[in-house]
Amino acid sequence: MQTQGHPLEPFFQQAVRNSYEGKLGLHDPDVSDYVAHLLCDFSEAENLYKVRDEAGKPIEDLTEMLHAADPINGSAASFDEERKVRKHIGDYALFVAGMYPGAMDTNRRHRRAHPSLTELIQAGKESYFIVSQFNLFEYEQEAPLFARLSERFERCILGLALIREELGPRKPLMLPPQVN
C-alpha cells in the first residue's frame, strides 16, 4: 500500500495512535496505520505533488488534480488511473487540512491557488469514497478502509491537527515548494 520501513514510521505510528485512539476515541488500527504511513510518505516534499500533467509537471491546484482524475471529461487514461489519482487527492486533502491549515485560503481572490477547508473536505471525502468503490480483484481487501476514511474524514483531520499542535511550532506552517 505505502512505504514500509520508513525511519519516521515508529514515531508517526505512536503520534497517530495517541491522537486518534487516545484523544478522539477512534479505535481503528487500519486507519491509524494508514495515516501514519501517509505522514511518512508526505514527509518527503516531492510525494506531495505526485500527480503530473501531460508535460510531466507536478500539479499543485486541487481543481487540476480533480480534472486529472476524471477518465471521461478529464485526463485520466483509465479507471485505474482515476483510482490512483483519487487516492492521492484524498491523501493530499487529509494531510493539508490537518497539518497545514495555513495553506488554505479564505480569500476568494486566491481560491484557485489555495482551496478552502470546505473544498478540501469535499474533495477528500469524495475521493476516498470513489476509491472505496473499486472493491473487486486486487482492490477488494483495502476498499473498506477507504470507505471508513471517507466516513471519518473530518475526525481524521482533527486527529492530524492534534498531532500538529503537539509537534509545534506555534507559528503558521507553509507547504513545501513543489519539486520539478
Image (tube, helix red, strand yellow):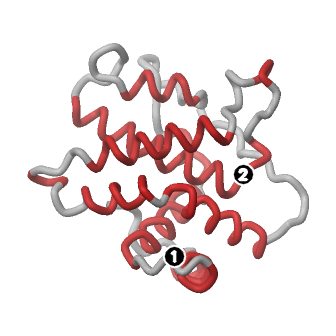
Q: Residues within 10 Å of mark 2 (few under 14, many from 20)?
A: some
Nearest to the eye among marks 2 and 1: give it: 2
Kindly identify the residue that appears in the image at 78 percent across and 69 percent down: 165
- Residue 18 percent coordinates (x, y): 60, 84
Q: Is residue 151 left or right of residue 107?
A: left
Secondary structure, mark 2, is loop
Q: Is residue 22 left or right of residue 137?
A: right
Name the residue nearer the viewer: 59 or 106: 106
**Label annotation for residue 122:** none
Residue carrying label 1: 9
Image quarter hosting the N terminus: bottom left
- Residue 17 percent coordinates (x, y): 54, 81
Amino acid type for the residue under numbered disc 2: Tyr
Name the residue nearer the viewer: 147 or 8: 147
Amino acid type for the residue under numbered disc 1: Glu
Image quarter hosting the C terminus: top right
Residue carrying label 2: 100
Q: Note whether 34 is above or below 28 in the view shown.
A: above
Report, in whole angstroms, how far the alpha carbon at label 2 lies from the one at label 1.
20 Å
Kindly identify the residue that appears in the image at 56 percent across and 76 percent down: 20
